[in-house]
Image (spheres, rainbow, N blue to C red):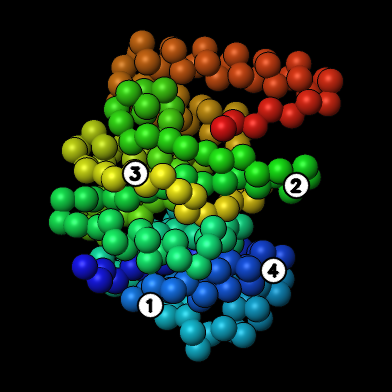
Amino acid sequence: MNPKISIITVSFNASKTIEATIKSVLSQSYKNIEYIIVDGKSTDDTLEIIKKYKKRITKVISKKDKGLYDAMNKGVKNCTGDYVFFLNADDVFKDMDVVRKIAKEFDENVDFVFGDVEFFYPDEKKCVRISREASISELKKGNMPPHQGTFVKKDLLEKYPFDLNYFSSADFDFFSKIIINGAKSKKLDFVVAINTIGGVSSGSISYKETEEIVKKNFGMFNYLSLLMKHRLLSNIKIVFNKFGIKIHKG
């Protein structure tokens, strides 16, 4: 197979990181790539940086949007690939052969392929490898495959667009929908991308939204179990922070 892969970068005032992201995509050894950047009308130098590479970018969309997930949906509507990957403006591929290695794993019976990601904490200059599974049992615990490490069939993203009612957990809602409805996956044992931590999916809003999605899909028992886990984690972080110790989820 030689599938066409659409890589979508969402950006807004990302002048400090967008160039590394663009270079990471353009340096990939796999060539059947469509690259789309969806920018939310940045007011810094983001668009000037993008212009430097415009001849090598398939499409640049710069319009005001309703947030991250609205921009991601716009990217899907404008792409033509068989599979879609979101590499946003805080992310870079682990190496230049990632997409080539991923493309070898696609077949008609696989709906999404995913690997691990590394979360980079700039304040500490520390990377933590994140490994997840794609299963109902993990969803019940509030866990999903990392979207920064997942390549998904375009038709699934068209069938289940990101729900704009969620501020930071529409990706968890998306994975819940496709896995519940029988999407087939393949997990690979290598790091796909490095994500710099500091985005929207942190804190109490993300916890609350994930809990509500679990309650909606898996019932009160799993909701209460997740609620207790999140409260325990929050209390542990408070205690450790008092001693200057940071806890990272791995």
Q: Which mark is residue 125?
A: 2
Q: CA distance from mark 3 to mark 4?
A: 33 Å
Compared with 135, 191 (above or below) is below
Tag nearer the camera, 4 or 1: 1
Q: CA distance from mark 1 to mark 2?
A: 32 Å
Image quarter where the C terminus lies is: top right
Q: Quadrant of residue 58?
A: bottom left
SS label for mark 1: loop
* Image coords of residue 122 (percent x, y): 74, 48
Farthest residue toward the left? 108
Pick whichever, 189 or 133, lies toward us: 189
Tell which circle, 4 or 1, labels the residue nearer the N-terminal end.
4
Q: CA distance from mark 3 to mark 2?
A: 28 Å
Q: Residue at x 33, y 36 (%)?
A: 134
Q: Residue at x 59, y 31 (%)?
A: 249
In the visual, does 47 lie left or right of 69?
right
Residue highlighted by disc 1:
31
Amino acid on which disc 2 is placed: Lys
Amino acid on which disc 1 is placed: Lys
Residue highlighted by disc 4:
15
Image quarter where the N terminus lies is: bottom left
Tell which circle, 3 or 4, labels the residue nearer the N-terminal end.
4
Residue highlighted by disc 3:
187
* Image coords of residue 151 (percent x, y): 35, 55
